[in-house]
Image (cartoon, helix red, strand yellow):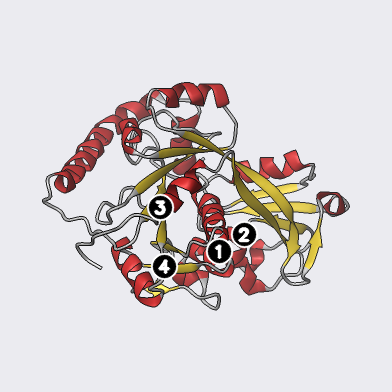
Amino acid sequence: MKLQHIIEQHWYNKANPFLTLLLFPFSIIYAIIVRIRKCLFIFKLKTQTKIAIPVVVIGNISVGGAGKTPLTKALAAELIARGIKVGIILRGYKGNADKELIVKTSDSSAVVGDEAMIYAQAGFRVAIARKRVAAAQLLLREYPDTQLILADDGMQHYYLDRDMEICVVESSRMFGNQHVLPLGPLREGMNRLNSVDAIVVNGYENHDRLANILAKYKVPVYYQVPEFVHFYNPQTQHIATVQEMKDKQLMAIAAIGNPTRFFSYLENLGVKLIKQQAFPDHYHYLKSDINSQYAIITTEKDYTKLAQFAASNIWVAVVNARLDNNQLIEQMVHLTQKEYKTNGS
């Protein structure tokens, strides 16, 4: 059993007493470092840069996939539908770009990262940089009429000042054992939830238990649910329903933060999977990973890397996120109506 799997079991399922003793001191050190770093910004020993337009950070306090990208897409699409010019910034995680870039549909996910390609292919304004401040500044230079910036991830990137923070929580995993790294999956302690403006729960698993945990933080809680659209074959341009896919020998593959959630979602739709294959998050696929014996179902994120193989047996599950109400959107629209001053633009 791989060490990563053993540690994740410890985080989310069954605690290992040996690992607790081993990791606890490192967890204390990590928590102290996180606190010191945050205090440097609180006491102005490190400077936050204020951008000339509102910035909304969509992040989480735990490692792994929580559903930030689908939420960011959904918020951006709704804001644009209301006439707001939106830009998206992110780090370009696992991409090898060595400078800030405006992301184009012709770019490679190996350069700009998976999530950045998803946004660009959906038609959004996107900029990446290792420093989010640089990404925001580049976006505004390229698109000076932008009215609001959504930052995918970056709750812990305090150099960029923000007008609103949304913490996304994955309902099936919740916060694990509620310890910080490496003893638990948290990047910051649970008390960080006191300072966010909203919590968006991805899914309804563990609803009552999670509601009890979140109730103590007095922060508005919203729910995001996946809304299945269709299966799409990028090579043949064919669109298929769940019923049409049932006649195929199906295999699902995913290299995301929580692939089990994706597989379960497909099965709950009524899709019968003969085989499932999970890869590490942000895995760079090989052609040999595409099993020609099956019709393969994967995610939009995974296809940004699988596209290079032009395999006609790959189908993308197109899924949109839907919020349980529009209050978050209304808050963001209100932000665009305020006046802003900047200490660096």
Residue 333 in picture, x, y percent from top left: 45, 52
In the picture, residue 285 is in which quadrant? bottom right
From the viewer's side, name the closer residue of 77 and 261.
77
Amino acid type of disc 2? Glu
Image vertical order of residue 82 relative to residue 234, above or below:
above
Q: Amino acid at mark 1?
A: Ile
Amino acid type at mark 4: Thr
Sequence-wise first label, 4 or 1: 1
Q: Is residue 322 visible?
A: yes
Q: In this image, 98 relative to 235: left or right? A: left
Type of the residue with mark 3: Asp
Q: Which mark is residue 118?
A: 1
Question: Could you say where residue 119 lies in the image, as x and y percent from the top left?
Answer: 53, 64
Earlier sequence position, callout 1 versus callout 3 = 1
In this view, the residue in front, 333 or 205, is 333
Mark 2 or mark 4: whose residue is earlier in sequence: 4
Residue at the extreme right of the image, as rendered: 247
Separation of residues labelled 2 and 1 (CA atoms): 7 Å
The residue that mark 3 highlights is 153
What numbered label is drawn on residue 16? none
Query: Which of the 4 quarters of the picture holds residue 225?
Result: top right
Q: How far apart, in angstroms, are the residues tagged by discs 4 and 3?
A: 19 Å
Residue occupying the point 52% across, 62% down:
83
Q: Mark 2 sits on what residue?
A: 300
Return the disc, 2 or 1, that comes first in the chain's sequence.
1
Which of disc 3 and disc 4 is earlier in sequence? Answer: 4
User: Cα distance, mark 2 to mark 3?
Assistant: 18 Å
The dot on residue 146 is: 4
Image quadrant for the C terminus?
Answer: bottom left
